Amino acid sequence: MNRREALKSVAFLMGSAISATTMGVLFESFSSPIDENKKLNFTATDETILAEFAEIIIPTTASSPGAKAAGLGTFIPMIIQDCYPVEMQEIFASGLKAMQYKSVKDFNKEFLATSPAERQKLMEDLRAEAIATNRAPSFFLLARDLTILGYYSSEIGCTQAREYLPVPGRYDGSAEYKPGQKAWATN
């Protein structure tokens, strides 16, 4: 199974956790050829910024590592480059630059130099802007959706953030669920 087919399967299983825009782009792009000459390139700094962005959305907790540990800093640009049409890649890249510009404007610091509280405030502002403008797709929505998709399709997301049974068994629609228990992962 190639990467596109695997992502299509995971995206389908994630259902409502991912926005309709991202689902549409992913499903549409699986059948669209990608022009290798038009792919955007992301720097190591971009990957570090995206890892920190993803960590704000899915932070490390006492029970499981966060998005950064799951490798989302490299996953997000890879998916943008390999699965998204050029127009969406450009929206994403310009949104990433706009986020960095907003960080300097609001805090007088590059994104990576901001404190956790400043990053949280920046994320809240980006989220509010995405909702207020009702502009789809936006950098924030794309990055958030890819964070969720990447994390819960990673080994960490499937085996540590969720309950995991490595040996497949029969389907039981009435499986006992205890308060505080992790959601079940599928394999």
Image (cartoon, rainbow, N blue to C red):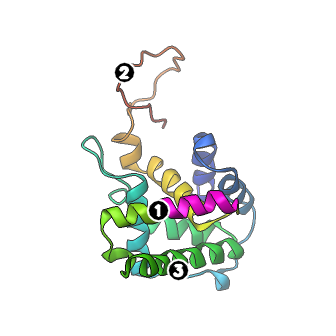
| Residue at screen point 63% across, 56% down | 131
Q: Which of marks 1 and 2 is in front?
A: 1
| Residue at screen point 36% across, 80% down | 109
Residue 101 sits inside the magenta stretch? no
Q: Where in the figure is residue 59, as x and y percent of width and height?
A: 35, 52
Q: What residue type is labelled 1?
A: Met
Q: Main secondary structure of the magenta part?
A: helix
Which span is picked out in magenta? 124-134
Residue 125 sits inside the magenta stretch? yes
Q: SS of the residue at dot 1?
A: helix
Residue placed under numbered mark 3 in the picture: 97
Quarter of the figure with residue 64? top left
Q: What residue type is labelled 2?
A: Pro
Q: In this view, does 165 lie to the left or right of 30?
A: left
Of marks 3 and 2, which one's residue comes earlier in the chain?
3
Instruction: State the CA–CA distance, disc 1 to disc 2.
Output: 30 Å
Instruction: State the CA–CA distance, disc 1 to disc 3.
Output: 14 Å
Residue 123, which numbered label? Answer: 1
Q: Which amino acid does label 3 sit on?
A: Lys
Q: Is residue 57 left or right of residue 127?
A: left
Q: SS of the residue at dot 3?
A: helix
* Residue 91 versus residue 181 in the image, above or below: below
Q: Where in the figure is residue 23, as x and y percent of width and height?
A: 67, 52
Of marks 1 and 2, which one's residue comes earlier in the chain?
1
